[in-house]
Amino acid sequence: MSGHWTEFIVFVVLFIGVAVMGFMASRWKAGDTMEHLDEWGLGGRKFGGWITWFLVGGDLYTAYTFVAVPALVFGAGALGFYALPYTVVLYPLVFLPVLRLWSVSRAKGYVTPADFVRGRYDSPTLALVIAITGIVATMPYIALQLVGLESVLRTMGINGHGIVGHLPLFIAFLVLALYTYQSGLRAPALIAFVKDGLIYLVIIVAVIYLPSKLGGWSHIFDSASAKFAPKGGKAATGSILLTKNNQLQYATLALGSALALFLYPHSATGILASRGRNVIKKNMIALPAYSFLLGLLALLGYVAIAAGTKPITNNATGRADGNTVVPVLFQGQFSGWFAGIAFAAIGIGALVPAAIMSIAAANLWTRNIYKEYINRGASSKQEAKQAKWASLVVKFGAVAFIFFIDPQFSIDLQLIGGVIILQTLPAVAIALYTRWQHSKALIAGWAVGLAWGLYLLYTIPNPANGKLHFGGSALQLGKLSIFGWHPFGTSPVQIYVGVVALAANLIVVVVVTVVLRAMKARDGQDETVGADYHVDEGDPGLRRVAAD
């Protein structure tokens, strides 16, 4: 901690400021009651254009994104830029589906994607599967926000051993848990204004100031190219250009990530909290501005190479923490007070998505597990109370990941989370347009896609850290086996596992549906009608917010 007091004081002051905002948020745009999931979990379903833009942007572009993307570019080069095409193609892909999801959810009072599945297919089992999948995929995502926050704390000198070393992190998340419990979704929505403002300020200053200090972009790219060049007969660890073996991985990882992002329950929560379809349309047009920010951020990986930045060793594991690359770069190149602002931006950037994710997971637990299987007659007040307590459990479950599991393992879990959440696409996204697929076929497809995806992930090693299994999400086509048949021979070309598992899922859904339809197997009753997918704010007879 010695020598970092200026950074730490600025960080703490800004952190305390947003904590106060979080507690005060319960009175911001408040409805008649907070004892309803519409109010606590969805902010009253009345967020306008600017609030939604900051909320969704603050949710999708997380603290881990801000440290991990440039760290990946620092370590692997061009492959780290996959986040750019992923966030560019994302919004055109989801533009129409999210409008339909908002309308049907507003018409029927759905709070979660699993609520929609329950109403669409009249299948509590399928809804349970979707809910559990969403919770499981979200938990490591929350843990990764802690990884981002810890990278900042570690850079400021808080790098102890064991649980004592994690104490500041625990305190930060205790404060987060308390103001989320009180204010619900309004807390991260309000704080997102501060978080995004700080992030924009820091990144714009960084990409203008740092290159001028380090010899310009030409020198920066030359330094990166020199780092990745083969040395002493050893293979290159990365490249500033894609290679023939990772181009398919780059494309499928970008596509798979784009398909997966709005399947995560926390992404849907931001959409369902919007006031109307026009708000969502404007946001789908405006949100790519964050992609521009992300591109600038990714370039900091190359800037760190030119600056000779070295990651800090994590005293808890004894290994270098690559996630500290950007914080160390800022610390070495900026004055103490501006480095403190940058650290606060990343730290607050962990709190916003972590709060939204925990609320989304709590909504799933409350609506699709607690009310469906434990207390069918739960009142709105009981639902809200259950969700509040569930959000606390989820947050401290995420903290447990960091306390008791190597942070690198939680990063691997996030890769698995993307593969897992993709398996809900047929039941959630496709079902917004057609109910042709049978509910039992959707369950079968989910099971096959999930099982095969996890198996393929299990077979992937990572020689860099000595892991034999779950070493990444890039599968060599030559390792792809279908009942012993290797359709791609020994090809070293890599592909994203999530896309492979989703393809298997879709094939099973189609085949099983054809069989079940031919057998005239009974399916549930759809409670939605065509008009539900087009309702908008102000329509006559629209369901009242917070109505039972």
Image (spheres, helix red, strand yellow):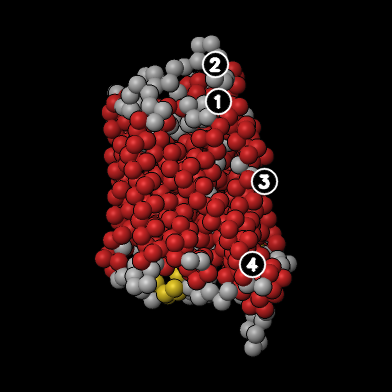
Instruction: List the residue tagged with mark 2.
Output: 538
Instruction: List the residue tagged with mark 1.
Output: 276
Instruction: List the residue tagged with mark 3.
Output: 89
Q: Secondary structure at mark 1?
A: loop
Disc 1 marks which amino acid? Gly
- Contact (Cβ within 8 Å) of mark 3 with mark 1: no
Real-space Cα distance between discs 4 and 1?
43 Å
Disc 3 marks which amino acid? Val
Which dot, 3 or 4, sits closer to the camera? Answer: 4
Instruction: List the residue tagged with mark 4.
Output: 211
Residue at screen point 53% across, 11% down:
540
Disc 4 marks which amino acid? Pro
Which dot, 4 or 2, sits closer to the camera? Answer: 4
Which dot, 2 or 3, sits closer to the camera? Answer: 2
Tell me: 97 left or right of 462: right
Locate residue 519, reporting x and y percent: 57, 29
Give residue 489's quadrant in the image: bottom right
Residue at screen point 46% across, 51% down:
349
